[in-house]
């Protein structure tokens, strides 16, 4: 499954990007794909470490390993991390009263 994103630039932002690249769409796509690749490497490494430390069979293939990492709670979405962080902050403030 592929997900499409649309990015709106102001005229000034477009002019600024025109200085950087002659293909803004390609540049944006490449930047996102490269960042996803870096995150995938971190997720796969964390999943392998977790599975090895806990005697869990490692899923076959990177796509399956990313899914496994989320299923096992080895990694969380950024949204979930923010929720957990806000809850931890609230909990720590309530203990100081």
Image (cartoon, rainbow, N blue to C red):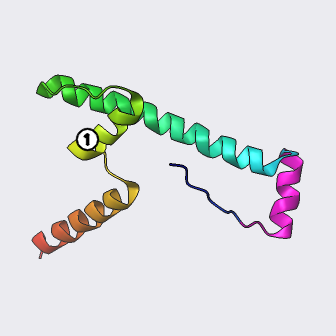
The quadrant holding residue 75 is top left
In the shown orientation, is residue 63 left or right of residue 29? Answer: left
Q: Nearer the viewer, residue 94 or 64?
A: 64
Q: Nearer the viewer, residue 74 or 90?
A: 74
Label 1: which residue?
74
The quadrant holding residue 50 is top left
Q: Nearer the viewer, residue 14 or 2?
A: 2
> Relative to 62, does residue 17 appear above or below in the rendering?
below
Main SS, magenta region, reads helix
Region of the chain picked out in magenta, as a range = 8-20
In the shown orientation, is residue 61 left or right of residue 58? Answer: right
Residue 68: image location, x then y, percent: 28, 38
Task: Find out whether residue 9 is within the magenta segment.
Answer: yes
Rendered residue at 16%/68% (across/down): 91
Rendered residue at 88%/52% (across/down): 18
Rendered residue at 30%/65% (across/down): 83
Residue 79: image location, x then y, percent: 38, 61
Residue 48: image location, x then y, percent: 28, 26
């Amino acid at each position: 499954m592929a997900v499409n994103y649309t990015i709106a630039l102001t005229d000034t932002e477009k002019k600024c990007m025109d200085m950087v690249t002659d293909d803004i769409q390609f540049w944006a796509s490449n930047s996102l794909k490269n960042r996803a690749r870096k995150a995938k490497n971190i997720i796969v490494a964390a999943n392998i470490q977790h599975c090895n430390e806990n005697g869990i069979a490692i899923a076959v293939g990177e796509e399956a390993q990313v899914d496994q990492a989320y299923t096992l709670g080895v990694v969380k979405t950024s949204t979930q991390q923010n929720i957990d962080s806000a809850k931890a902050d609230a909990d720590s403030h309530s203990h100081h009263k």
